[in-house]
Amino acid sequence: MSAALLGGERRRPPGGSATALLDAAAAETVRRRAGVRPAVPRQRPRPAPEDARTPLPTAAEQRLATLLAERAGSGPGHAGAAGRRGAGPDLGELLPQWLAEANRRGYRAPADLLPALLDAARARTDLRAETLAFAGPRALWLARHNPDWRFALRDGARRRIPGAGEDPGAGERVWQEGLFAERVAVLSSLRRHRPEAGLALLASTWQTERAEDRLMFLDSLRQGLSEADEPFLERALADRSRTVRATAAELLAALPGSALAARMAERARACVAPDRVRGGGIVVEAPPECDAGMQRDGVIPKPPTGRGERAWWLVQLVEASPLDVWCERLEGRTPEQIIALPVADGWRDDLHAAWCGAAVRQRNAAWARALIGEPIEPFAEGPGDPARLLSVLPEEERGAWAARFIAAHGLSEAFRILGVCAVPWSLPLGRSVVDALEIARDAGSYPWSFSGVMGLAERCLDPSDAERLAPLAAVPDVREEESPGAGAYWAESFQRLVSTLRLRGTMLAELGERG
């Protein structure tokens, strides 16, 4: 071995020459092979299950192959060494929309593209749900033979849960015998379709589960959460694990009719009251301590760095209290009227932030609407997170609010708001985004600052807007105050936007073809 590694000129090989060394190695190889016992033949695997869905049209199948090749970095739109995108569409970013539309139309995946689809879903978790729906039962068959695709067994378990009239014991068998990830998926699926069955399954093994597993299983109860879960969650408040107790408290607080919500409301009412001295406002008296009962109900005693203890306890109490409490506590006022009331002694920001958290947790559209108000203020001046509050409102209302926000403030703070709007964007929202981009270009703004919004527009604008936007793709005349190269970059960005919208329109047409 030393002679083979170092070379015959540095270490004399056995036999005196390199030829003798190679002869000895050849003889050893034959000896080893001759001594190997024949392998015991394994049972041939069962064939992959059939998929009876409609095959893709030819053009759509070719498009899918192109999108998958682009995702792997081999397509024509792949960024160069400097990372700058060209004027052509980013095909890899169109794959999620293509998969969603193919699933909506009920197509099955081509067998020869299944490995590339699973590789794509392995690399991008946001593709997994649509990919597994499109790939169907054959994806799970492949995943059992390739460890790289084991995620499909976890994420696909929910698709194997039996429905009404099928074997009711299949889910229980996976729960008792499956891998941890498969058990989580089974529980999540049952919670979507039969919440009470999922709860019974979890309760049957709860005492024997590890703490970290209990936490993951408990988190699955968010799906289908109802008053029927309250007794189990109340028992979980006494769990050995602090994180399990905190999660149970959070889930109970999302049930306005729960006993925990009533306890929190009683504590919060003692802290927030009408200001009868000055009249017409709200007075706040934060809790003086965080007692054992508060901690059992999920109040975290130690505040984050830079936050006062009493303010921290107050926010947690109010956030966990049913929002209907405040209409009764504050003399029958509506959420809009309550939000408009002055709050004494500088407690307004803490109180409004707590109400924002409660509106999101309880999915209360009336309070979210009152708290977010009209989009006249930038983010830093309003309570809570507008994007989270927007997510509580109906889709059409979200788009209309976002359009007004962009008209008032431009695009500098709009990226997170656009992320919670329905796709494709509504006509008013799409027009407000394009108008704001055009205003930014004409004002000589740095185009690179808007690359994120431009990328969203490529995926979220309605494809029918392509021709209306085509004039923006022309290279404008260079102005003295403009950044060098900005005009060409803006033109290139609009060219890419228009070409992407046209391609999306073509993709939809291809998926609509019938062979």
Image (cartoon, rainbow, N blue to C red):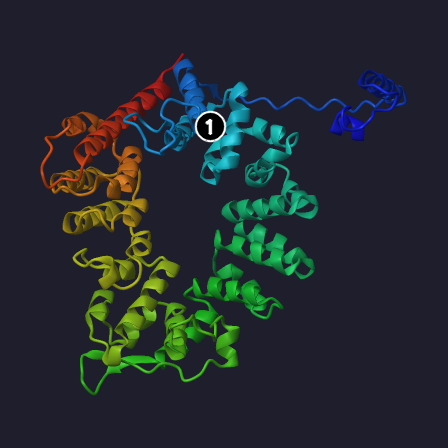
Specify the quadrant that holds the N terminus: top right
Nearest the camera: 257 or 89?
Answer: 89
Q: Is residue 231 visible?
A: no
Residue 129 x %, y %: 48, 37
Q: Residue furthest bottom?
A: 277
Three-letter code, disc 1: Ala
The residue tagged with tag 1: helix, strand or loop?
A: loop
- Residue 491, compared with residue 451, is above or below; it is above
In the image, residue 265 sits, relative to residue 60, either above or below, namely below
Q: Quadrant of residue 438?
A: top left
| Left or right: residue 152 compared with residue 125 | right
Q: Position of residue 365 (x, y in %)?
A: 30, 57
> x, y (%) of residue 195?
53, 51
Image-based side of 373 in relation to 239, left or right: left
Quadrant of the image for the C terminus? top left
Residue 264 seen in the figure: yes
Residue at 53% x, 30% y: name it.
Answer: 118
Count of numbered circles on the image: 1
Q: Is residue 234 left or right of residue 411?
A: right
Residue 476, relative to residue 393: is it above or below? above
Query: Residue tagged by mark 1?
Result: 72
* Residue 46 location, quadrant: top right
User: Which of these two is toward me, 215 or 227?
Assistant: 215
Q: Residues within 10 Å of mark 1 (few under 14, many from 20)?
A: some
* Left or right: residue 394 compared with residue 100: left
Q: Of all residues shown, which one is farthest toward the top?
A: 515
Q: Residue at x 16, y 57 (%)?
A: 376
Q: Position of residue 258 (x, y in %)?
A: 46, 67
Q: Is residue 256 above or below residue 458?
A: below
